[in-house]
Image (cartoon, rainbow, N blue to C red):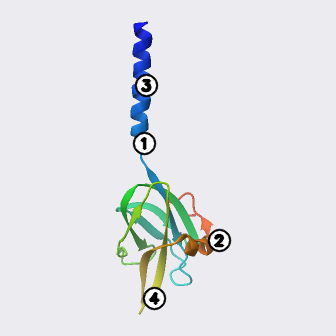
Amino acid sequence: MKTFKFSLLAFLLATTFGAFSQTNTGKVYLIRSTGYTGSAVNYSIFVDGKLICKLKNKSFSIHNLNVGEHKVTVVSGGLSNGKKSAPLTFMVAENKTNYITVASTQNGYANKITCQEITENSATPILAKAKEHTNCLTEE
């Protein structure tokens, strides 16, 4: 009987601690639809300094990130100076979705890459014309 009680207690403790150790996450869509400028090269996207995705033009990827503040930066592939874009800071809330778009603009002879958080209403038509990129760290 003591063995049964001990086993039951161990099981209850294990399941209780397992429930508390789950990480709360939110969904983040990374969207690249840059038009003609810079469309031939992949963009490497970093979240909190870690490379999480390489995106071609007219594509997007979906990521689950921990709740809290994050920073996203982008660097152009191909012949670039390797300089990351200005960081965009955004908040991830539990069970909520963020939409971040990557844009490229011509600034003289150079392209400038920027990140911007957009609403779901703004993202929906862009996503309809884009392809989901599920294997983010490889080039397709």
Where does label 4 land, which residue?
106
Disc 4 residue type (three-letter):
Gln
Q: CA distance from mark 3 to mark 2?
A: 46 Å
Classify mark 2: helix, strand or loop: helix
Disc 2 residue type (three-letter):
Ala
Tell which tag, 2 or 4, sits nearer the viewer.
2
| Circle 2 Cα neighbour tier, 10 Å, few/some/many (<14 / 14–19 / ≥20) | few
Say which label, 3 or 1, has the lower sequence index.
3
Asked if one can make out residue 126 in the rendered structure from this viewpoint, the answer is yes
Where does label 1 land, which residue?
22
Quadrant in the picture for residue 126:
bottom right
Q: Which disc, if any, is residue 12?
A: 3
Residue 88, image x, y percentages: 38, 71
Q: Nearer the viewer, residue 126 or 107?
A: 126
Classify mark 1: helix, strand or loop: loop
Asked if one can make out residue 138 in the rendered structure from this viewpoint, the answer is no
Q: CA distance from mark 2 to mark 4?
A: 25 Å
Q: Which disc, if any, is residue 128?
A: 2
Say which label, 3 or 4, has the lower sequence index.
3
At 43% from the left edge and 75% from the top edge, which residue is drawn?
115
